[in-house]
Amino acid sequence: MTQHIETDVAIVGAGPVGLFAVFQLGMLKLSSVLIDALAETGGQCAALYPEKPIYDIPAHPAIEAAALIAQLEQQIAPFPTPRLLGRQVTGLSGACGGFTLTTDTGDTIRAKAVIVAAGAGAFGPNRPPLDGLAAYEASGAVQYYVRRREDLRGKRVTIAGGGDSAVDWALALKDIARVAVVHRRAKFRAAPESAVRLDDAVRKGEIEMVVPYQLHGLTGTDGKLSSVEVATLDGTVKSIPADMLLPFFGLSMDLGPIAAWGLQSQAHRVEADPATGQTSLPGVFAIGDVATYPGKLKLILQGFSEAAVAAHAIFPIVHPGQALHFEYSTSKGVPA
């Protein structure tokens, strides 16, 4: 249903940093609306790796991505925030203090400031160039992320890739599935500790290492996978029995319509002032993975900090001439 909303701040992106921005704005009694192209909140945490543990959230030695999103949803529950999900922002007009945003479904949002918390922007998997791939994708025999680890119990799983995702999922699945890892070289780009654990699992026979090979083809009938063909650079081909292929070759990232807003950017990231989060367009702020500046760390916790910085920088835009007296949450609590 098409909606027309007036609010203090429009937040483009409903991932973890966008959700925390709702909280920070709410603590300053600023209203907001969440807009996201995905059909649910949580961004990549919800769409790509809901069961993957995250280890660098303060006070949580480990927390699964989906649980983190659930906690953030609980944290912002006191602040009534409309969600325009399954929608892409297609237009931005106006100026600081009076923006109008439009979506591909005809929604209109009037806001005094805009926060871009779009993460990697529009993202999708880098697909391997294999014949007949679409049929196996449609049947679920080829997947680019794991939503439920338990769905792979007892299956023969081939994982392709040499980064953190490939190594992390090989380790996560080795106790419930028969796992083979395909990579073009013996050295992996994963975190050193994870690479050591992978080597240990290979020595124990818990994971089969297939190197130096690359994906070559898929064998099966009617979308049901029976084996994955791999090949060396000199053309030697071998077949790995498999029920499922998980290719982890990263994401293709695109700012989409945001790229047409005229924001200064580099390498698909929006340049922001680290002191305020403001972009080259006054009144538009960038936080989280989409933002870049000297010394930027691509960590969720830094995105959380950026959300707080941006919220305080936005307050005088919404309430010009009104002094903001900083108070700790322990003193003022959550505004009613």
Image: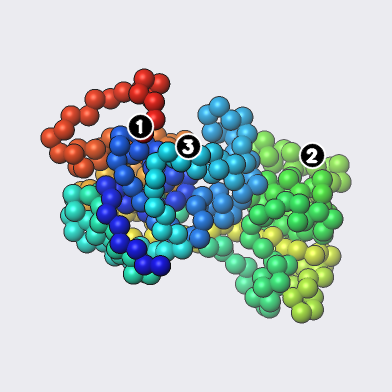
Relative vertical location of residue 30 with respect to residue 221 in this rendering, above or below: above
Residue marked by disc 2: 200
The quadrant of the image that shows the N terminus is bottom left
Relative vertical location of residue 275 with respect to residue 246 in this rendering, above or below: above
- Amino acid type indicated by mark 1: Pro
Residue 9 visible at all: yes
Residue marked by disc 1: 335
Which is more N-terminal, label 2 or label 1?
2
- Amino acid type indicated by mark 2: Asp
Position in image of residue 273 (x %, y %): 28, 41
Packing grade of label 3 (10 A; few <14, some 14-19, many >=20) is some
Tell me what residue is drawn at x 40 percent, y 38 percent.
23
Which is more N-terminal, label 3 or label 1?
3
Towards the viewer: 47 or 122: 47
For the residues bearing labels 3 and 2, Cβ distance under 8 angstroms:
no
Which is more N-terminal, label 2 or label 3?
3
Packing grade of label 2 (10 A; few <14, some 14-19, many >=20) is few
Residue marked by disc 3: 75
Position in image of residue 40 (x %, y %): 51, 56
- The quadrant holding residue 255 is bottom left
Tell me what residue is drawn at x 32 percent, y 51 percent.
10
